[in-house]
Image (spheres, grey):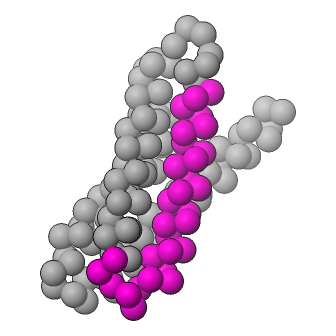
Amino acid sequence: MQNHNSNFKIDFYKRLIKFSISVIYFCNDIRKDRNLWSVADQLIRSATSIGANIIEAKAASSKLDFLKYFQIALKSANETKYWLIIVKETCPNLLQKADQILKEAEEITKIISSAILTMKGKKKL
């Protein structure tokens, strides 16, 4: 069981990195519209913050600190979804790619939310 959990963590870290990279490349297309430069910047910040906070949690000094990093990652994931919805509403030509990235953001959000609920359910946080 421990090995499965370890493999899931490694796969999730890789998934977060892949997600961040896909958002960075996607923002190249968004930046073609000068009016959306700030949206692209915010999208990159929030999307890359998800993985950064999950990785930072590995070095947490306590279980409560660990939980706080996951909560910050969840907030970043929700913010990322917001910016993706803005892109979808303003860039019909990017709708399909935005939908793909939004779907991944929603799945990542569910995983993080589930982890938070599990952590909160454990005693001695």
Q: Residue furthest right?
A: 1
Dividing the picture into quadrants, the one containing residue 104 is bottom right
Where does residue 49 sit, x and y in percent of width and height? 36, 51
In-front residue for pair 33/58: 33
Residue 3 sits inside the magenta stretch: no
Instruction: Let me know if residue 113 is in the magenta part.
Output: yes
Where, by quadrant of the figure, is residue 15 drawn?
bottom right
Q: Find residue 94 and report its horizontal and vertical position in percent.
A: 41, 85
State the count of labels.
0
- Above or below, comparing residue 7 to residue 81 in the picture: above
Q: Residue at (29%, 80%) from the top-left corner?
A: 90
| Up-down relation of residue 22 to residue 58 (above or below) | below
Query: Left of 119 or right of it: where is 93?
Result: left
Quadrant into which the N terminus falls: top right
Left-right relation of 93 to 35 = right
**Rendered residue at 60%/37% (across/down):** 114
Q: Position of residue 108 (x, y in %)?
A: 55, 53
| Magenta span dominant secondary structure | helix
Q: Judge whether 86 appears above or below 113 on screen.
A: below
Question: For the point 50% across and 70% down, which residue is it?
Answer: 101
Can residue 83 be spotted in the picture? yes
- In the displayed orientation, state which residue is furthest to the front: 89
Identify which residue is drawn at 31% across, 70% down: 86
Q: Is residue 17 visible?
A: no
Report whether 68 appears left or right of 43: right
Image: 109 above or below 125: below
Residues drawn in magenta: 89-118
